Image (cartoon, grey):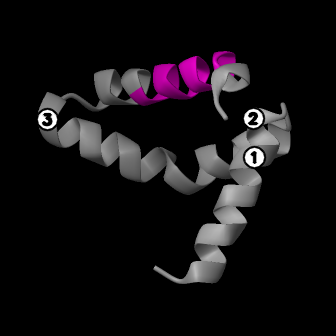
Amino acid sequence: MDTNILNKEFLILQKMIEGDEKALKYFFDSYYVDLCNFVNSYIKNEMISEDIVQNIFIYFWGKKNSFT
């Protein structure tokens, strides 16, 4: 993967940890579909897969202050 992309995502991740909701939206928009597809490859139920991924984002947002 391109180093510039990794640096950009790292900076956006830092912003999200600081509470920037736009950064959270960026990660959600960028990874939601791929994560749903990944989870669904194991669960075999799209609705449950979407719930799991949404809960992961909610959990991550709630724990953002504990990440360094």
Task: Say which residue label 2 marks.
Answer: 17
Q: Is residue 32 left or right of residue 65?
A: left
* x, y percent for residue 61: 66, 24
Q: Which mark is residue 42?
A: 3
Q: Is residue 55 magenta?
A: yes
Q: Quadrant of the N terminus?
A: bottom left
Number of marks: 3
Q: Which mark is residue 14?
A: 1
Q: Residues within 10 Å of mark 2 (few under 14, many from 20)?
A: many
* x, y percent for residue 34: 39, 52
* x, y percent for residue 28: 61, 44
Q: CA distance from mark 3 to mark 2?
A: 29 Å
Query: Which amino acid, mark 3?
Result: Tyr
Which range is magenta?
Answer: 53-63
User: Where is 35 relative to 9, above or below?
Assistant: above
* SS at badge 3: helix
Query: Which amino acid, mark 2?
Result: Ile
- Mark 3 / mark 1, whichever is N-terminal: 1
Asked which quadrant contains residue 16, the reply is: top right
- Residue located at (69% from left, 48% from top): 13
- Mark 3 / mark 2, whichever is N-terminal: 2
The answer, for residue 55, to whether it is visible in the render is yes
Observer-nearest residue: 50 or 22?
Answer: 22
Instruction: Say if mark 3 contacts mark 2, CB within 8 Å.
Output: no
* x, y percent for residue 46: 28, 32
- Residue located at (75% from left, 58% from top): 11
